[in-house]
Image (spheres, helix red, strand yellow):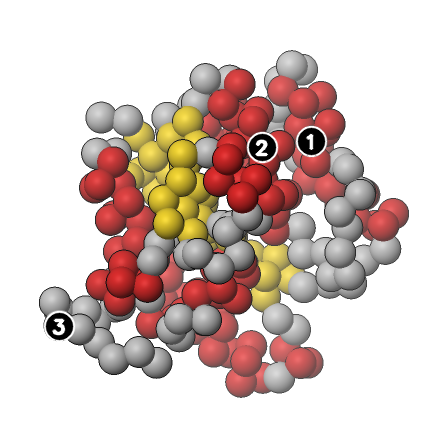
């Protein structure tokens, strides 16, 4: 049975799932297990990548978020966080290079990673570093460390396409899974994909016991 690691782009997930339901009521464990069971994959790990709000922007929001992350960790989910920051293009490039340099990449992999993730053409106002972090970890876990045969990316963001192509070129598999909203065509065309529809989300409520739950 092929081994799979699930990589969750939490910010992207939250902003699109909330169009259906309250995201915190959906079990990412159930989502991951559903996908792996359907595809007969052995789930090795779930990795949750999220930005942390500044406490100065509101104590309730901050502490609610930290409690939620703590609950994920209790479920055995690996939580990776970065603080929201406003950075200049020069600072973003510096942070990206530092992230790449901190990895133990071989001389063949490093130039490929740099070519894919040091591009500043898509810089946005608030750089979180989350997308880059996920992309690098996907490459590292599958290609460098060989900890999985299949990367399951829960995101609809087109920024992951370079990483997907690199992983596939190295002979590993990538599956993307996301709700219909915000699921880019380019990402779907680059991977085998699994659309998480409203009916599926309903069955993945944390307290779901087989009965239909009213929409929130």
Q: Mark 2 highlights which residue?
A: 163
Callout 2: SS: helix
Label 1–label 2 contact, CB within 8 A: yes
Q: Nearer the viewer, mark 3 or mark 1?
A: 3
Question: Looking at the image, which residue is at 61% across and 57% down?
Answer: 82
Q: CA distance from mark 1 to mark 2?
A: 7 Å
Q: Which residue is mark 3?
A: 211
Real-space CA distance between mark 3 and mark 2, rounded to the nearest whole angstrom: 39 Å
Residue 171 in the image, given as x and y percentages of width and height? 45, 17
Count of numbered circles on the image: 3
| Residue under the image location 42 percent in, 56 percent down | 179
Q: CA distance from mark 3 to mark 1?
A: 46 Å
The residue closer to the viewer here, 205 or 66, is 205
Residue shown at 72%/29% (left/top)?
114
Counting from the top left corner in percent of width and height, residue 136 is at: 59, 36
Q: Is residue 39 above or below residue 70?
A: above
Say which of marks 3 and 2 sits in front: 3
User: Which of marks 2 and 3 precedes in the sequence?
Assistant: 2
- Determine which quarter of the picture holds residue 72: bottom left
Name the residue tied to disc 1. 116
Q: Secondary structure at mark 3?
A: loop
Horizontally, residue 50 falls left or right of residue 95, namely: left
Q: Please tell me how crowded label 3 is: few (under 14), some (14-19), or many (20+) other residues with Cα within 10 Å.
A: few
Q: Secondary structure at mark 1?
A: helix
Q: Is residue 147 visible?
A: no
Q: Earlier in the sequence, mark 3 or mark 1?
A: 1
Q: Residues within 10 Å of mark 2 (few under 14, many from 20)?
A: many
Quadrant location, the N terminus:
top left
Query: Given contact means CB atoms under 8 Å apart, are the residues at marks 3 and 2 in contact?
Result: no
Mark toward the start of the polypeptide (1 vs 2):
1
Position above or below: 47 against 171: below
Decide if residue 153 is in sight here: yes
């Amino acid at each position: 049975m092929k081994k799979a690691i699930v990589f969750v782009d939490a910010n992207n997930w939250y902003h699109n799932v909330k169009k259906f339901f309250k995201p915190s009521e959906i079990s990412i464990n159930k989502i991951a297990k559903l996908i792996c069971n359907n595809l007969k994959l052995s789930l090795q790990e779930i990795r949750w990548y999220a930005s942390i709000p500044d406490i100065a922007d509101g104590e309730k929001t901050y502490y609610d978020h930290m409690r939620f992350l703590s609950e994920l960790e209790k479920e055995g989910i690996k939580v990776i966080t970065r603080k929201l920051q406003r950075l200049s293009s020069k600072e973003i490039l510096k942070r990206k290079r530092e992230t790449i340099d901190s990895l133990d990449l071989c001389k063949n992999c490093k130039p490929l990673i740099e070519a894919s993730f040091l591009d500043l053409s898509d810089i946005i106002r608030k750089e979180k570093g989350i997308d880059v972090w996920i992309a690098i970890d996907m490459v590292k876990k599958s290609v460098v460390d060989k900890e999985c045969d299949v990367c399951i990316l829960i995101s609809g963001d087109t920024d992951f396409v370079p990483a997907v192509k690199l992983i596939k070129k190295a002979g590993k598999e990538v599956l993307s899974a996301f709700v219909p909203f915000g699921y880019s065509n380019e990402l779907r065309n680059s991977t085998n994909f699994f659309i998480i529809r409203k009916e599926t989300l309903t069955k993945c409520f944390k307290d779901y016991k087989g009965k239909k739950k009213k929409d929130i």
